[in-house]
């Protein structure tokens, strides 16, 4: 059996020093081992001194018996009292007490640990419940936001459809306005021709009657043409304003705008559309920019079609170009006219297409001449882009202030 450790006898050893100190004050003094005297002035027994004190007391049976007689539970624990009594088998009994005390202490530690673990479990459950509640609220919020997002997407889709309709109407109005301007110019030319014929009429009476007829006819035509143009101008402005506002709200790229007010137009000289910095005029990027502008796009039909679809028949080339160009016009709201050679081509006099104007040159007139006449005829305020690789007309239209886009660059935008 192992010996009881000194630390378990601390209460008995402290009691022994207390009795020894008090015994020295009596008369006659109490018998005390002289080896204890150096320890009487100590406030507390050091752990390293416990073994020495134990041996001193165990060597003096008289002092030990006196201590055993005076030891009370209030001052000395049970293990200490067993040691002071020194009866046979006290070590076994003391060890049993120590084991029981250790088991009780361990049980208390376990209970304390269990209580702490239970508190942590409850705290974890409460935290989990809070997290689950937050997740539920978050899921509900996300579901509500997704539903709102779906509604917004539906609204945007409807607004986009309306915008597409407005764009189509805007293109139609532009085409109608162009035709109205053509009719107004035609009426002016007819009036001028009638005036020329009037000079050839003989006799003052006949000339006066013819002049009245010409004046009445020309004035009526001009008034009708001007009224139509004014109405279409107003419709065009209203459509463009509505489309621009919708595109601003939807965050969509704007339709081609009116010519910038700051652009300087010299009398009788057309100003070409300015390209962004660093953009090469013959590139597809330049073609894309010009198509998006408000300029009239004049396409040299067969010059582009033969380059774009060389393996197809002439008719298939023509139809492919028209179809692709119509899609381009719808995407960007572009004002496009395609000019082909020859009015005797099958299908040349088919119904007018909605988005792209298709023109076939009269008999004996080339598409190049039609394009030249169109550029020269249009007011200088109207910006024009000519799509061709034909050097014979490039120099002419550039001299009249038109932008030129190579056919291959235009094909890249289709």
Image: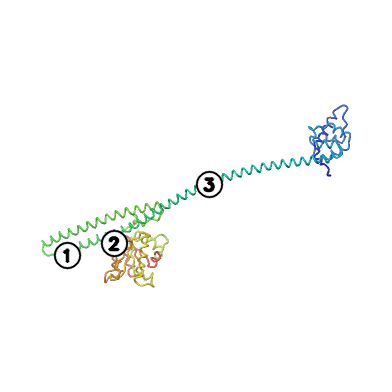
Mark 1 or 2, nearer chain start: 1
Residue 209 position within the rendered picture, expressed as x and y whole percent measured from the top left: 13, 60
**Badge 2 local density, few (<14 within 10 Å), some, or many (20+)?**
some
Q: Quadrant of residue 15?
A: top right
Mark 3 or 2, nearer chain start: 3
Residue visible at 33% across and 70% down?
Answer: 392
Residue 400's disc is: none
SS for dot 1: helix
SS for dot 2: loop
Q: Which residue is mark 1?
A: 197
**Badge 1 local density, few (<14 within 10 Å), some, or many (20+)?**
some
Could you say which is closer to the camera, residue 218 or residue 279?
Answer: 218
Mark 1 or 3, nearer chain start: 3
- Classify 312 as above or below 48: below
Residue visible at 38% across and 55% down?
Answer: 161
Residue 263 position within the rendered picture, expressed as x and y whole percent measured from the top left: 34, 57
Q: Quadrant of residue 167?
A: bottom left
Cα separation, mark 3 vs mark 2, equals 67 Å
Cα separation, mark 1 vs mark 2, equals 26 Å
Residue visible at 28% across and 71% down?
Answer: 344
Asked if the residue at tag 2 contacts the one at tag 1, i.e. Cβ–Cβ closer than 8 Å, the answer is no
Disc count in the image? 3
Quadrant, the C terminus: bottom left
- Classify 361 as above or below 130: below
Q: Which residue is mark 2?
A: 378
Q: Is residue 362 left or right of residue 77?
A: left
Q: Which residue is mark 3?
A: 136
């Amino acid at each position: 059996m192992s010996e009881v450790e000194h630390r378990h006898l601390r209460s008995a050893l402290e009691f022994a020093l207390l009795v020894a100190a008090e015994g020295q004050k009596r008369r006659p003094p109490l018998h005390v081992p002289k080896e204890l005297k150096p320890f009487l002035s100590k406030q507390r027994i050091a752990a390293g001194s416990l073994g020495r004190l134990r041996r001193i007391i165990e060597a003096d049976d008289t002092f030990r018996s006196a201590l055993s007689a005076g030891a009370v539970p209030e001052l000395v624990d049970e293990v200490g009292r067993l040691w002071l009594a020194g009866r046979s088998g006290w070590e076994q009994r003391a060890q049993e007490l120590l084991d029981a005390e250790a088991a009780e202490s361990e049980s208390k530690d376990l209970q304390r640990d269990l209580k702490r673990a239970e508190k942590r479990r409850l705290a974890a459950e409460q935290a989990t419940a809070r997290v689950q509640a937050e997740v539920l609220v978050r899921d509900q919020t996300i579901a509500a936001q997704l539903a709102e997002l779906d509604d917004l997407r539906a609204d945007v889709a409807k607004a986009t459809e309306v915008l597409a309709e407005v764009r189509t109407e805007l293109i139609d109005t532009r085409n109608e306005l162009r035709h109205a301007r053509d009719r107004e110019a035609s009426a002016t030319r007819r009036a001028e021709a009638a005036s020329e014929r009037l000079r050839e009429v003989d006799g003052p009476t006949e000339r006066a009657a013819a002049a009245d007829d010409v004046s009445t006819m020309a004035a009526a035509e001009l008034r009708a043409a001007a009224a139509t143009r004014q109405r279409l101008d107003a419709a065009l402005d209203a459509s463009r304003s509505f489309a621009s506002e919708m595109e601003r709200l939807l965050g969509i790229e704007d339709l081609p705008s009116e010519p910038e007010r700051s652009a300087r137009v010299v009398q009788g000289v057309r100003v070409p559309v300015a390209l962004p910095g660093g953009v090469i005029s013959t590139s597809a990027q330049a073609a894309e920019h010009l198509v998006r502008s408000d300029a009239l796009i004049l396409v040299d039909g067969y010059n582009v079609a033969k380059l774009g679809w060389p393996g197809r028949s002439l008719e298939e080339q023509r139809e492919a170009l028209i179809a692709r160009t119509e899609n381009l016009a719808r995407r960007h709201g572009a004002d496009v006219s395609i000019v082909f050679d020859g009015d005797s081509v099958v299908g040349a006099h088919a119904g007018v297409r909605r988005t792209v104007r298709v023109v076939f040159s009269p008999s004996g007139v080339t598409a190049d001449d039609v394009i030249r006449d169109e550029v020269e005829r249009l007011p200088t305020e109207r910006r024009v882009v000519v799509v061709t690789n034909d050097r014979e007309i490039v120099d002419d239209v550039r001299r009249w202030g038109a932008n030129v886009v190579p056919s291959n660059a235009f094909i890249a935008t289709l």
